[in-house]
Amino acid sequence: MSRFVIGVDLGGTKIYTALADREGNLLAEVKVPTEAGAGTRHVIDRIIQTVAQVQREAGADGPAVALGIGAPGPLNVSTGVVYQAPNLGWHDVPLKSLLEERLQVPVAVENDANLAALGEYMCGAGRGAKDMVYITVSTGVGGGLILNGRLYHGTGYGAGEIGHITIDPRGPRCNCGNYGCLEAVASGTAMAREARRLVEGGGGKAILEAAGGEREAITAGAVARAAAAGDREAGEIIAGAGRMLGIGVAGIINLLNPDTVVLGGGAMQAGPLLWEAMEREIDRRALKKSREQVRLVPAALGSRSGLLGAVVLARQQAGWLKTT
Amino acid sequence: MSRFVIGVDLGGTKIYTALADREGNLLAEVKVPTEAGAGTRHVIDRIIQTVAQVQREAGADGPAVALGIGAPGPLNVSTGVVYQAPNLGWHDVPLKSLLEERLQVPVAVENDANLAALGEYMCGAGRGAKDMVYITVSTGVGGGLILNGRLYHGTGYGAGEIGHITIDPRGPRCNCGNYGCLEAVASGTAMAREARRLVEGGGGKAILEAAGGEREAITAGAVARAAAAGDREAGEIIAGAGRMLGIGVAGIINLLNPDTVVLGGGAMQAGPLLWEAMEREIDRRALKKSREQVRLVPAALGSRSGLLGAVVLARQQAGWLKTT
């Protein structure tokens, strides 16, 4: 065990760390709460504790060859500075140099959605793809692009903001301040908002029941449970989100002609109605040839996509994988 | 003059051919009508005549080192087969092998919008870019993507269909059969359609006048002339198209984080109202960082972008330019 790498998926609520060998096999994993409220230094300490822990568990001697870490929010891959991570309360945090100083190991930093895309591409539903679009639908909508077999970053590492493509110019307001973004019309948050509106208007009985009778407790999960039990109103909310998602995905298919679109995230679990409505809209709106050439697949790695992507990043950093 | 290449921009109405030296300087140019109605063989003959003509004019001896040609419609870059070119009445035409057989010269074939993108990238408004989006707005809306300094094709050479991204799910029907595509809401055809609708409703007097009093003669050009003369209704049509264009461009900026967006095509000449409305919508809808990092520029090569792109393609084919 002298040659190993570390992958870290740093999120707003948990730090998920793994140790892997040259081939990417995970030999130890640990998950701890982030405790972001205690400040940046505390979070860095916790990351370092998890690294020590997986090394102990795997019986590793000596330092890792490299560490790959995914962070939420926009960042600069080459300097390793996280510009903004609201979930962590971070602003211009030099994550790469903070970790390198403490660990004396080369560190590669990447946006978490990009790492999830990389994880699915190398180890999950996107294996064998050349041009792959990864979309995660949960409280928000995010994504990452693999083009010509490489993570595509754009000019300032800002590419992949799929959630902020306008789907409906007259649509509801998004967190970004804009109107009708994919995130504002197809996320779990959007489904919950529609359900609450329905309940406010006197409808949505089954959904309210699924939320334990509390309007404020209505989530996409409650909508999904009501729909699974056969509630028509809940089904319509889910299908509506699926249609909006389909409009967005069709546009990306027409623009990028990918061979694979991988869809993950908690809100994709809202049931078959979501997927069916999405697919119908894609069939309708994508150009025939591009539609025929693309495979739509559910993500395969669940909540481990980012961690596995971080391990891939670390192996690339170690020179064990070609990055092209 | 023993080492030269040929570039050809094959369109539905004209064949535009040039001879260039190793550095890409054009030494002779010729433009002839395509006469597509006379059949594929006739069009091939005419291409070959133009090649002979530019060679004569440039005093070239011997065959070209390579020929690059742009064709309208989807095609396979590696086999050189044009799948569909409605303007030429073509269906599965093996353009590359037809020309290679006759000319005994290596031929590279590319989609015309992609070549226009390549032309602007290498010789025009996109010089120095790394990630460039090219959009042409004329009767239709097309485009091409340069990502990481290379033409991006997608899995089946179908990328760049910017005109068929849905902008308004409830919008007017597009030629592709779908509703609310960028092409259906922001092209010259869309502006003319809005103007005709206005006239049918009893308005649009200045536009009708600019079209010589004939409703059927209303074009985007007539709308532009009326707007230039200060007509408010014409200005609103143009600004409306600009807003739709801005929504589409903002989505692409959020998805691809390009450093440069080049906008060309006849309908972009509709006047400053178009550009201003587009830019306002981009300012509103693009994520702040990605907006700051992108340069919006008018195309610099006019109707010669495709021809110059074809010359670049030929120089790449000749091994005189790196393709990476």
Image: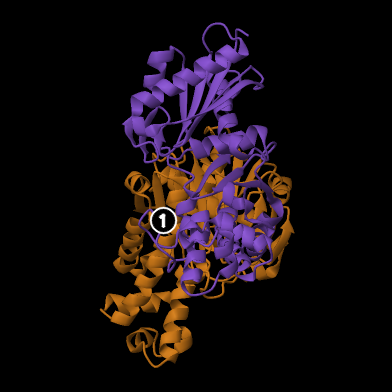
Chain colours: A purple, B orange
Q: Residues within 10 Å of mark 1 (few under 14, many from 20)?
A: many
Count the marks: how many? 1
- Residue projecting furthest to the bottom: B202
Quadrant of the image occupied by residue B49:
bottom right
Tell me the residue at 52%/20% (across/down): A317
* Quadrant holding the C terminus of chain A: top right
Q: Is residue B56 visible?
A: no
**On screen, residue B87 above or below A12:** below
Q: At which x and y percent is residue B118?
A: 49, 46
B31 displayed left or right of A293: left
Q: At which x and y percent is residue B251?
A: 45, 55
B79 displayed left or right of B291: right
**On screen, residue B202 above or below A35:** below
Q: Amino acid at mark 1?
A: Ala
- Residue projecting furthest to the left: B230
* Quadrant holding the N terminus of chain A: top right
Circle 1 SS class: helix
Q: At which x and y percent is residue A206?
A: 60, 67
Q: Is residue B157 visible?
A: yes
Depth check: B119 or A165 in front? Answer: A165
Depth check: B308 or B186 in front? Answer: B186
Depth check: A286 or B107 in front? Answer: A286
Tell me the residue at 58%/46% (across/down): A265
Protein chain holding label 1: B
B282 displayed left or right of A139: left
Depth check: A153 or B91 in front? Answer: A153
Q: At which x and y percent is residue B51?
A: 59, 51
The residue that disc 1 covers is: B250
